[in-house]
Amino acid sequence: MSAIVFLKLARSGGFHVQRRALLTSKGPKGDRRPFHCLFTGRRSNSRFDPDGSGRPTTWDSFGIWDNRIDEPILLPPSIRYGMPIPKVSLAKVGCSSLIGQRKENEDRVQVSQMTNNILYFAVFDGHGGPQAADFCDKYMEKYIKDLIAEEQNLELVLTKAFLEIDKALARHLHFSGNASFLSSGTTATVALLRDGIELVVGSVGDSRALLSRKGKAFKLTVDHTPERKDEKERIKKSGGFVTWNSLGQANVNGRLAMTRSIGDFDLKTSGVIAEPETKRITLHHAHDTFLALTTDGINFIMNSQEICDVINQCHDPNEAAQLISEQALQYGSEDNSTIIVVPFGAWGKQKSSETSYSFSRSFVSSGRWA
């Protein structure tokens, strides 16, 4: 499909054009040309080539346009980027958070339309009390939104937002007058999706983000734990130390299993920082199935590819989120289990009846090591 056709559609049909409205369109000389649809074997005359294969994109390249999820095209970004970009609707996003064996659920989850072209997804896994996770759950979006008004680089926006909210939390806990709150902290994994195609992720701690591309799991975050050589060196240079508990898990100063977090102010002088690691990726909706954000109640018991495989068997993202959080508990997780599943253009393309799951799994092959 040429940009000319997109422009004509924009003038005649508005910004969101459903698939059925694209069956025919007038070309530059007024001739009516058929577009590819799910019920015809003809190829589209699209010139878009998002995967560099040299083959034109057909409308059934997007699994999201099957009978399960049917979404409109976002015309302005499609014209800008030169490829069809489906809208990601918040109503289609799946979320689940289970308390597990804990007395309290300290995980927090947020999904929202931050601006007219930016979606916001976040998971926070609190520890040492819910204060830090609650604060981030309430204010992180506001800090990011304020920064976006002045800065277009979303990686820089996330870095500044994490650092600023950490300072604000310190002031908030100081005025609370409760010294025990200084040991409250939280992981933070935040994803911003701009124009349906630019995905930027920022993270501290051991909550994760992964992308399913052609059925394979691509980790967008790396856990901040004392096992990482670079993280351990920073802790030691700052005067902190690393010990191992009875399960073989490394801890900063014998207390914290992560080297970056928001909060944990009693460990700031030992090298625990709130600066996130960020990653930017351009989505290819013909191949990208979903984004998943998970807390360690899931990560510690299921590896990334296993999470990816399970989700790809599900009918819709909400079912997928519920299944993953429940399956983590069935596999033996005692922690809060929280997940967000955001469907992309290839949703449904990787579904296969050949994949099976067993409860007699190897613990070594799962969790934070994979």
Image (cartoon, helix red, strand yellow):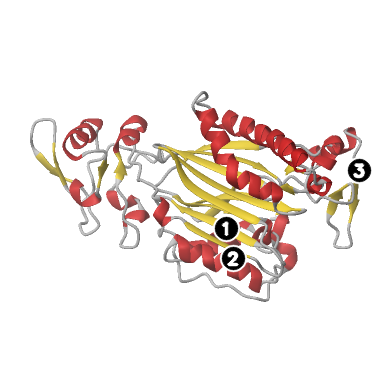
Give the mark nearest the N terminus, 1 or 3: 3
Across and down, in percent, residue 24 comes to 14, 45
Q: Which residue is mark 3?
A: 241
* Quarter location, residue 232: top right
Is the residue 321 above or below the residue 356 in the image? Answer: above
**Marks 1/3: CA–CA distance:** 32 Å
How crowded is the residue under tag 1: few (<14 C-alpha within 10 Å), some, or many (20+)?
A: many
Asked whether residue 170 appears in the rendered view, the answer is yes
The residue located at (74%, 37%) in the rendering is 170
Q: What SS does tag 1 mark?
A: strand
**Tag 3, which secondary structure?**
loop
Sequence-wise, the earlier of marks 3 and 2 is 3
Q: Nearer the viewer, residue 216 or 81?
A: 81
Residue type, numbered disc 2: Ser
Q: Which residue is labeled 2 in the image?
A: 325
Quadrant position of the N terminus in the picture:
top left
The image shows residue 341 at horizontal and vertical percentages of 50, 56
- Residue at image point 33% right, 42% down: 55
**Given the current orientation, which residue lies at the most extreme left position?**
30
Kindly identify the amino acid type of the residue bearing the numbered disc 1.
Answer: Ile
Q: Which residue is mark 1?
A: 339
Please name the residue shown 25% across and 57% down the image. Answer: 38
